[in-house]
Image: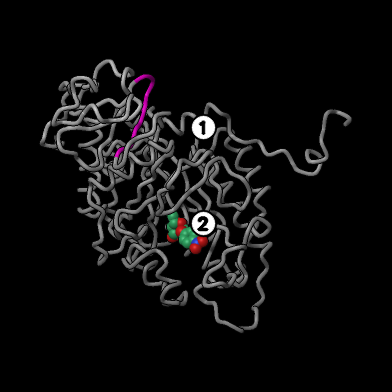
Amino acid sequence: MPHGLSPHDRTTPAIHRTSPARLAEFREQRFGLFIHWGLYALAARHEWVKQRERLTDEQYQPYFDHFDPDLFDPDAWAEAAAGAGMRYMVLTTKHHDGFCLWDSAYTDYSVANTPYGKDLVGPIVEAFRSRGLGVGFYHSLIDWHHAHFPIDGLHPAYAEGATPVDRNIEIYQSYLHNQVEELLTRYGRIDTMWFDFSYSKRVRDGKRTPGGKGAADWRSEELAAMVRRLQPDILINDRLEIPGDFTTPEQFQPPAPPAEVWEACQTLNGSWGYDRDNLDYKPVDLLVRMLVDTVAKNGNLLLNVGPNGRGAFDPRALESLRGIGEWMRLHGRSIYGAGPSAYEAPADCRYTQRGDRLYVHLFAWPYKHLHLPGLAGKVRYAQLLNDASEIRVLVPDPAVDSGHTKLGALPPGTLTLQLPVQRPDV
Ligand code: JFZ
């Protein structure tokens, strides 16, 4: 082939993907805060409320007219995140309802025209950056407010069999690209771009979403190229329907470690936006197990808080973050810069490893003995992480340990740890 090009190279525009060093940096951060905030915080019943209840623009308008977060304190948000051990955040600059948290030159449908009347994105970025946390933007590809976003099966105004109204997606495409450009040129360095989402191939109850949209509708290749031109070190997620830098399993812990860079996104109570009556909060120990499970599979965890209409975190959300932070203070060494181990953990355990340190996380506390297959002869010293107290290590000898303990009957190569009966609680 002339110039060493394969036919594939000629037809596919070169997409500059983020450098391995930047991907490694992202992986080392491990834990981030997702923030879903917008007009739906005032409805306080899920961020899809406009679609779920098929609200018209007029019915949705009171949330705009009353948007005035008097308790908004981005430093308190950043402090809560840092206290939980989070290393970055991702903010909804615009969600599916189309409401913009910054003063965009391309629409009146932004915070600038609410009673609050000023930019929110800048102060939030500033607060997190000044604490050394990374900053990412969530940006909805879907827009239920824009007059030229073609109505589809997910749109609040969708009606089966309705005659299509005059909408020109090209006008929406320019709007989308222009706004992303605005976001990536106004606020300094942005670490991740989290687009949401494509559904051209989405199937529910055996049916495709009518009018489902994807890469051709967003002009994804072009959009991604612009993002990388404006922010060369940025990471782009995988929801543009073209390959991204990382994948985004949602409210799902992958059963086996994915091969690629990945980030699980999870809620505290099943809702992303502030959802007053939803009290289905995950207990702190479950959240910690989710984080450990993620790191053991070489992923990141993006854990969500939906601030309320006054701009505050719900006390329950703060409690959850504090609880995780307490655990992280003592066990962060097994999370930051740690990753999967080549050893296979026994049932109800996860291994994370950092250099030659192996961390054993017990999801169920056993009675006195923990048997670790294949680790005999590999461990010089063992200790609890929370207080550095020694854990006695036994390597059973069939000749002498065949008595009533039957330790000698364990498979050869098994290492046994002698644990305290009481689980150390942080
Ligand atoms: C999306 C958003 O719709 C949701 O509000 C939240 O922002 C979350 C992080 O991302 O969630 C999805 C994405 C895809 C589907 C449903 C919800 N889907 O394909 O059905």
Left or right of 219, for residue 121 = left
Residue 83: x %, y % from top left: 25, 37
- Taking the spot 38% from the left edge, 33% from the top edge, the residue there is 344
**In front here: 15 or 67?**
15
Residue 350 magenta-highlighted: yes
- Taking the spot 51% from the left edge, 42% from the top edge, the residue there is 186
Total numbered circles:
2
Label number found at residue 23: 1
Residue 370: x %, y % from top left: 22, 32
Residue 117 magenta-highlighted: no
Left or right of 266, for residue 322 = left
Q: Which amino acid is tagged 1?
A: Leu
Disc 2 crowd, CA 10 A, few/some/many (<14, 14-19, 20+): many
- Please state the extent of the stretch shown in magenta in the rendering: 349-356
Label 2 beta carbon within 8 A of ligand 1: yes
- Taking the spot 61% from the left edge, 84% from the top edge, the residue there is 161
Magenta stretch, main secondary structure, is: strand
Per the image, label 1 sits on a secondary structure element best described as helix
Residue 405: x %, y % from top left: 15, 31
| Up-down relation of residue 166 to residue 305 (above or below) | below
Looking at the rendering, in which quadrant would you find the C terminus? top left
